Structure formats: structure tokens, C-alpha cells
Amino acid sequence: MPKTVLTSGAFDLIHYGHIRLLEEAKSHGGPDARLVVIIARDETVRRLKGKPPVFPEDQRRALLEALKVVDEALLGYEDLDMATVIEAVKPDIIAVGHDQEDIERMAREAIEKKGLPIEVVKIGRFGKSDLNSSSKIKRKIVEDLRGAF
Amino acid sequence: MPKTVLTSGAFDLIHYGHIRLLEEAKSHGGPDARLVVIIARDETVRRLKGKPPVFPEDQRRALLEALKVVDEALLGYEDLDMATVIEAVKPDIIAVGHDQEDIERMAREAIEKKGLPIEVVKIGRFGKSDLNSSSKIKRKIVEDLRGAF
């Protein structure tokens, strides 16, 4: 049976680094894997990052689902309840980014508590010098625009 | 035979408005249409907009090809030669945005000169108040970041 891989994020300013991370996540489930992505709610982004996302949650979700690599994109839960997400998606694998320590911890706790056969894998960052985070992208845009205001 | 729809752009900061425009462009070719997108070269963006794109052309091309709605994404020609593009892609329909007057004019000239049976369609902008252009997005990012530097 095809494996379901679950991953999550804010996905506010989409760039090619996201595609590679999503492809890496999906690859852990083998060639016929299904990739489900949980999109962080606006309120969650605001709470965790101290500022709202550039794009509202509905647009972020729709854009993710418009990607070939993504089979399904779902909005998250405001209280970030990992047990609820696992119950809804029934993943075989949960892929977490290197900066998602909290999500990794919550996933491992939920898995252990219920004794579920779910594998947790870490997915990497590519090319240290690349534009591989929204913060770097925003900084570059601001640098490009300096003097224009 | 499935129709080929050709459209083009810089596609620097991808947002959901792009997806809707691409879907609208493809819809002009019917349910089994094929959508080919020409991605403006870095040098072309620099010349036309007076500043380089945030993302290099290879990343912009790869991201577009990662979209479900896009069948093929190709890098443009530095001299923006529409006749060469038409010869390479052999489109049935060319979809141009409301801000692509130059491309529309070049397309119509090339079509007329060679007497080709290619239809030119205009595709719209959605939701005046939405974030529907890269300039608006950049402005919002800068506004969000004000005080953070």
C-alpha cells in the first residue's frame, strides 16, 4: 500500500528550496508515496514568529496544493495538536525540517503515547548560500528596495 | 488534438494570483490543453524592470514547472524574439496579461507577418484589493519589516 508522508510549515513565500524539501520528504515514502502537507494557520504563524504571514492561510494552502509534489494540503489546528493531526492524516512517516524542533518533539510524544508505527525523518536544508528561508528572501527584497522609498 | 497555450512572465515571487492566471490561460485551450510558460531571463527582467529578480532564472523556471497547471516551463530568449518562441512552441493560443502590452504587440506582429492561425487572448487580474503583483508583495514585506532594521 502506498505510504503517506506528512510534513508541515508556514509556506509563506514559496521558493524553489521548498520544492526540494517537499520532494525530499515525499521520497522517504518510496516511489508511490502520497504527500500531505499541514499549513500553519495565520494565528499560529503570528504566535510563533511574532508577526502575521504575508499571505493569508487560504492562499498559502491553495498554492501548496497547486504543486505537483503535493497530494493534499490541509490547514492546521490553531492549538497545533499533533495527536489530532496524526489521527486525521494517518501518516506512515512524518518529515520535519531542521528548524522544526518543537514539531519533532510533539510528533515523537504523540507517537510514543499511542504506540504508533510512525517513522520520524529529518529533512535537510540545501545550499547554505542559497535563498533557503523566507527571512533571507525578505532581507534580499528589502536590500533591493533600499533607496526606492 | 490538444491545444497548446503559450504564456510568459517573470514569475519572481510566486503567489496564488499567478496560479489563477495560469489556470485561466490554460482554460482557453479547453479541458485537455497543454500549457507552456516562457520564463523571462534575468537579463530581460533587469532591462525591463530596472532591477534584477530576487530569484535566478533557473529557480524561477524550475518552480513554474513544479506547478500542476504547467506542462512545460522554458527560459526565454534574451532578445525577446516572439517569432522564435512561436516557431519553437507552436502554440494555438497566446495568453497575455493586462500589463503585457509589448508582448501582445510583438505576438500580433509575428502572427500577422507569417499568417499563422494563432489566437491571442487577454487574461485578467483578480481581486483589486488582493496581493496580485510582485510589487505589492514587496511593499507589504517592507511595511511588515519596518522598524525591524
Image (cartoon, coloured by chain):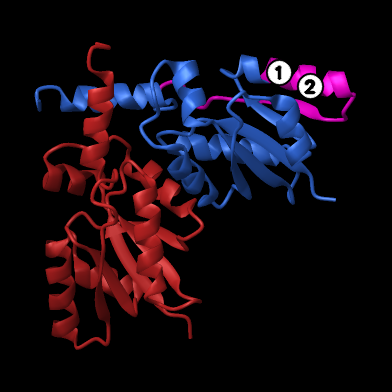
Chain colours: A blue, B red
Residue A18 drawn at (x, y percent): 50, 35
Residue A20 versus residue B78: which sits nearer the camera? A20
Q: Chain of mark 1?
A: A
Q: Is residue B53 visible?
A: no
**In the rendered image, which quarter is residue A102 located in?**
top right
Chain letter for the residue marked with disc 2 in the picture: A
Residue A94 screen position, x and y as percent: 72, 31
The percent position of residue B60, horizontal first and vertical second, equals 37, 45
- Residue A5: mark in rendering: none
Residue B93 placement: quadrant: bottom left
Q: Is residue A8 above or below residue A146?
A: below
- Would you say the residues marked 2 and 1 are in contact, meaning their CB atoms lie under 8 Å apart? yes
Q: Secondary structure at mark 1?
A: helix
Residue at horizontal 23%, vertical 51%? Answer: B128
Q: Are marks 2 and 1 on the same chain?
A: yes
| Residue A121 image point, x, y percent | 72, 26
SS category of the residue bearing label 2: helix
Residue drawn at 75 percent across, 43 percent down: A4
Residue A82 or B12: which is nearer the viewer? A82
Q: Could you tell me which residue is drawn at 82 percent across and 30 percent down?
A: A118
Label at residue A110:
2
State the residue lying farthest toward the right.
Answer: A115
Please rate how many residues cluster around mark 1, counting C-alpha atoms within 10 Å: few if below 14, some from 14 to 19, many from 20: some
Picture quadrant of residue B70 = bottom left
Magenta stretch bounds: A104-129
Relative placement, left or right, of B115 versus B54 is left
> Label 1 amino acid?
Met
**Could you tell me the amino acid type at mark 2?**
Ala
Please give left or right for residue B137 compared with residue A5 in the image: left
- Give the labeled residue for mark 1: A106
Horizontal side of A113 relative to B69 (left or right) equals: right
